[in-house]
Image (cartoon, rainbow, N blue to C red):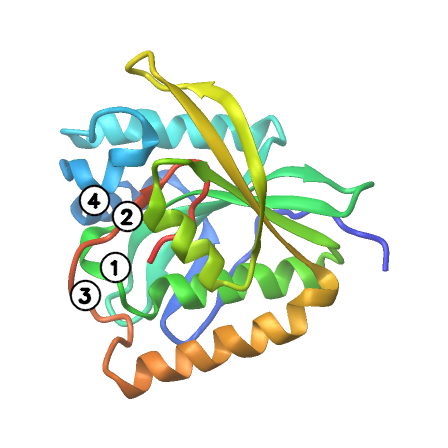
Amino acid sequence: MTATRPSPTTLTGRHVRLEPLDPRHLPDLFAAGGRDEEVWRWQGGPAPRTEEELAVKLREVRAEAERGELVPFAVVHRAEDRAIGWTCYMDVAVDDERLEIGWTWYGRAYWRTAVNTESKLLLLTHAFEELGMGRVQWKTDHLNHRSQAAIARLGARREGVLRRHRRRPDGTWRDSVYFSLLADEWPPAKERLSARLRGSLADGRDGAPQGPAAWHRSGGAGE
């Protein structure tokens, strides 16, 4: 199957709907994650204190999308019908049948619910089964152990570390930990993710707001 470049689309699950990120999502996004330093911790900058500060970040995402560098989605909580975060396809290489999932965050209240599991299930299903990708990758800060654990739970394999890969805003250097999932690894991973989603329903973690969430600028696995 020849890979296809992703384009803005809507992916719908039971708990969340991933739809093209748009300025109209801004008020809900700020309500979900504005002013929360923990949510924005791994972006490498302060949390947006106002809607306008978040709007600057949203415009950055949309500018990259217009340049063809990524495809951003608003994560909409279906029961509440409001945006609670965003996630992206990025680093797309059609000839190499490869893309990355990253620049993901969810509001603190949606951590350890079905939101992240279903979001990743939707993104991975679309990437492998509709776009024909052979590889999906993630990268995250070597200090972001929560993100690394969350990516591993998706069924992804830890590949290695790019040392001194990126300068953080505070001047320190980050190593980037890379993970990947290949097309032939996807069927069992899909079944595990689907089972986790069913388990979330069984134990009450069904996507309703509960506890803290996480921001992962370049890994984006969430919790």
Residue at numbered disc 4: 33
The CA distance from mark 2 to mark 3 is 13 Å
Q: How many marks?
A: 4
Residue sticking out furthest to the top = 171
Q: Position of residue 98 (x, y in %)?
A: 71, 45
Which one is nearer the viewer's eye here, 63 or 128?
128
Residue at numbered disc 2: 214
Q: Quadrant of the C terminus?
A: bottom left
Look at the numbered disc 2 and give the secondary structure of its residue: loop
The CA distance from mark 2 to mark 1 is 7 Å
| Label 3 Cα neighbours within 10 Å, binned few <14 / some 14-19 / many ≥20 | some
In primary-sequence order, the first of circles 4 and 2 is 4
When the figure is inspected, residue 69 is found, relative to residue 164, above or below; the finding is below
Badge 2 amino acid: Ala
In primary-sequence order, the first of circles 1 and 4 is 4
The CA distance from mark 3 to mark 4 is 13 Å
Of marks 1 and 3, the one in the foreground: 1
In primary-sequence order, the first of circles 3 and 4 is 4
Residue at numbered disc 1: 111
When the figure is inspected, residue 187 is found, relative to residue 30, above or below; the finding is below
**Labels 2 & 1 near each other (Cβ < 8 A):** yes
In this orientation, does residue 72 appear?
no
